[in-house]
Each structure stands twice: as structure tokens, then as C-alpha cells.
Amino acid sequence: MGVTVQEFEFDFGGGVTEICSFTVTVNDTEPPVIECSEDIVVSNDPGECGAIVNYSNGTYSGEEILVDKVPPGSLSGWG
């Protein structure tokens, strides 16, 4: 989604060039619907500064891509 400018340069040889450009605008016509997982509280794993946390991913609908910064089953630090 957003605006970008496409530019083309034509080289006819002999130092003769021509440039043309146009703007492409992409609009998202359907906003995403996001449902988050429930809050989770866990204690540190013994000897670790964090815990292995398993949880179910939230759900979403839309054209966007879901990016999971800490996948389920990863060591999650304090905070």
C-alpha cells in the first residue's frame, strides 16, 4: 500500500534520451481484522533469564503478512 513513481529512460543512441514517469497508488480496500491471544504469565525456567513459552498465535484476516517476532516455543526474556 502506498505511492511509488515509475520512471523509464529511453536511450535512442547518439546522446538522445527521453524520460517518462507515472505514479502508481495502491489502496487497501479491506482493513485487516486482528484477534490477539490471551495474556500469559509464566515463571523463569530454572537457571535461565527467561522461559520457554508456548502459546497459540492470534488470528487475522486480510492481505497483510503476519510477522511473529517471538514464535511459540521460543525462549522469551523478561518483560
Image (tube, rainbow, N blue to C red):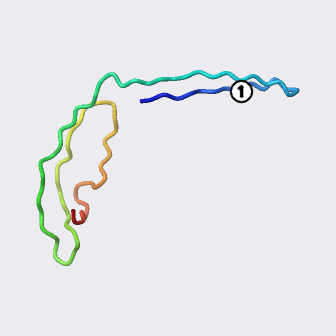
Q: Is residue 79 left or right of residue 10?
A: left
Left or right of residue 18: residue 69:
left
Q: Depth check: 8 or 60 in front?
A: 8
Q: Quadrant of residue 2?
A: top left
Q: Which kind of residue does numbered mark 1 sit on?
A: Glu
- Quadrant placement of the C terminus: bottom left
Identified at 11% across, 60% down, the residue is 41
The spot of residue 9 in percent (x, y) is 71, 27
Q: Is 64 placed above or below 52 here? A: above
Q: Looking at the image, is 75 positioned above or below residue 37?
A: below
Q: Is residue 39 left or right of residue 1?
A: left
Disc 1 target residue? 9
Residue drawn where x is 18% and y is 38% of the image: 35
The structure residue drawn at horizontal position 17% and vertical position 49%, both measured from the top left corner, is 56
Quadrant in the rendering for residue 17: top right
Q: Residue furthest bottom?
A: 47
Image mark count: 1
Image quarter of the N terminus = top left
Q: Secondary structure at mark 1?
A: strand
Q: Determine the image quadrant of residue 70.
A: bottom left
Q: Name the foreground residue: 77 vs 60.
A: 77
Looking at the picture, how far across and down is residue 38, in whole percent? 12, 48
Residue appearing at x 12%, y 63% in the figure? 42
